[in-house]
Structure formats: structure tokens, C-alpha cells
Image (tube, rainbow, N blue to C red):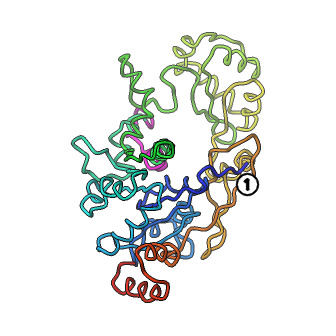
Amino acid sequence: MNLKPLKGVRVLDLTTINPFTDTEFSDYGAEVIKVERPGSGDSIRDYPPFKDGVSVYHCYTDRGKKSITLNLRSDEGKEILKELVKNADILVENFKAGTMEKMGLGYEELSRINPALVYGKLSSYGNTGPQKNYIAYDIAVQAQTGIMDATGQPEDEPSRVGCYVSDHLSCTYLGTAIVMALYHAKKTGEGQRVEASMFESVFSVMGEKIAAYNCGKNASRTGHLHDAFAPYDILPCKDGYAALAVTTDAQWSAFCAAFGLENRYSTNDERREKYLSTLRGELTELFSGMTRNEIDSKCAAAGVPAGPVSTMEEAINSDQIKARCMEPAVTDQRIGDVLTVGKVIHYGETFEADSFTTAPLLGQDNAEIIGAALAGQGVAPNDMQSRMAELVEQGVI
């Protein structure tokens, strides 16, 4: 069921580089109006990789949105945004701390125009603390939250998690906060400002390591191994690597039965004690004559958590990804079909493949959106074309 729970909700997207919160809003039915700089637009349009000169990343992150251009440092641009705020439900921005306030467009000002407005703020480190004014990208946030210290082999240098984990986590948290605030606003008429930071979002997933620290145990890199369970590892096999995660004695017993092994390490404490010295070598020898799929099938039949370590190409083309409709194509109006990532949340027990509309050209919705704002300011229909031309000439749109 392709339910659109945010249908009828209007979002003003002022974010730059990191627009995933509003991408998700668009996916679930909201009208998302991307507000961009005249001439150049959001920097995400210049973000690699490129296909025929077009950012494929932009095709994904801005799918389904509308685009207007607006110079928010000009008086006319500010007034147009304020007009748009009157009919908006949500505004999302991720400028440097204090930027919107300096322009006279902070929450206090905008809430006087629309008391029910939900104002979402995405920041690097939050609005308090010694780093509140710092600007950060994903790698800097990962470095400071401990997740790098927890990633990689103990004898190697710390490692970055190989995706923009801070961007996606923070946008997911912010989206959840905004929807909860929107629910409150729809019931009471009272909007509010909500914030999520990249720093706190990544730190929030470090609970396992914090628990270990509380107990005086190793909170740094353990490689593929788990602090508490064994075998919990990535092991070589005939055609690559396989992941194995045994967390109960019952799972271990089932694993031994499935692979014809004598159950010599019946408790987790025994397995942890003997894992590096003995058990890991025995499992490596066992898996050396088996393929990833053979290991996966045996473990699945026995109810033991495991899986092949897939290449990115294998993951994209896997039957499970296809069955869950997680790789739909966006048909971009410039370069054609672009493979993208599907929606994670589904409503009901059955669902159809999603059909996403293309990412917008820069300012392609100026006539519709800004034209309506100018009409709200009293510009007559006969004067609309000339007024729009003036704003273009003045660099306002």
C-alpha cells in the first residue's frame, strides 16, 4: 500500500547539501518546495558522481520536490519567503547557527507570521556547548563521536564508516521530531522549533560501547568481533566472506547440528574464551570448502543469523532488495533513468513499487510558487509577468 500520510502538508526546504529529511517528506506525499540561490542553486547540484554533467546524487536527494530561486539576503526575497510561510506547515534549514536570525527569518519572527509553523533545524553540534558554532561534515562528526575508534581492526588505524552515517541519522531523527511537532500543531495550533544535530545523532548509536565503558571493558575497536558474544565474526570462505552471529547457546547448538560439528563449546563463555585461540581457526577451515550461499542456506534453515558479505553490485542486484522494491529508478528529465534507494517504511502488509517524480530543474516552479506569493502581496495578474521579470533582473529570484 503506497500510503501518502503527508499529503496536503507543505514544506519549505531551505537545507543545503544535506536534504534527506525533506526527501523523505516528499516520498510520503508532502509538497516540498526547495528554496535555492538564484543562478547557482543548492551545492548538492554540483555534488559527484556525475552522469553527462548531472549530479546523480542530486537526482536522488531532490526527487519529487519543487524548486524556486530566492535571494534571502534581499529585502524582496525575505518578504516573499514570509508570504510563503503563511501557508506552510514546515520549514527546514541547516544554515550555520544564527544565520536565519541575522536575516530576520528566525523562528521567533516566522512564528509571528504563522503560529502553527513547525521549524526544523539541522545543525552540526547543536545550539549549545563549545562547538555550537562549528561547521562539520560527516568525517569530522564520525571522528569526534567515537564511532571511528569503534570501527576497524584493533591493530589498525581508526576507520570511517563507509557512508554518510551522520547525515542520514540526523535527518531521520529530525524528520521524526518534525512529524511529532506537526501532530501537536494540528491538534493545538501551536508550532515550535525542533532541532537535531549530526554529532548527537551519531553518538546516540554508541550505546553498546558506552555500556562496555561503564563496566570497565574495551570500548574501542574489536574488528568484526563482538564484545559479548562468540562466534560473531566475518570469516573467509570458498568465494569470499560470510558473516556469522551466534548470540545464544541454542543458536550454537543448532549451528553445530546443521554443519555436523561436535558441540565442544556449549556455553558462550567457553566460546569467547577459546574463540581466537581455537574456534576461529576451526570455523575458517570448515568454511574454506563452502560458498557463501551454502553457508547462508544452512544457517537460515537452522535459524542461525548469518549472511554472505556482498559486494555493492551484488547487494544492488540481490533478490531481497528487488523483492522489497528498494531500488526504484527515478526518470530524470535530463539524463533518463537513475537507480536510487527506495522507501524504508511501508504501510500495510502488501505494497507496490514506488514511482518517484524527477528532481526539479533550478527554479522550474518559480512561476507557480513565487507567482502565488506575489499575488498574496497584492500584485495584479496583469502586472505579474513584468514584476517577475523585475525580480529576475534584480537578482531576487
Residue identifier under label 1: 353
Quadrant for residue 112, please give it: bottom left
Front-most of 307 and 29? 29
Estimate the x, y position of residue 239 in percent, counting from the top left: 69, 42
Front-most of 4 and 213? 4
Estimate the x, y position of residue 179 in percent, counting from the top left: 50, 45
In the picture, measured across the screen, residue 309 lies left or right of residue 116, that is: right
Q: Amino acid at mark 1?
A: Ala
Q: Quadrant of the C terminus?
A: bottom left
Estimate the x, y position of residue 349 in percent, counting from the top left: 75, 40
Q: Is residue 329 above or below residue 52?
A: above
Residue 167 part of the magenta-drawn span: yes
Q: Which residues are magenta?
A: 151-170
Q: Give the structural element (helix, strand or loop) at label 1.
A: loop
Magenta span: predominant SS is loop
Q: Is residue 389 above or below residue 208?
A: below
Question: What residue is shown at x 69% (from left), y 12% (from top)?
Answer: 263
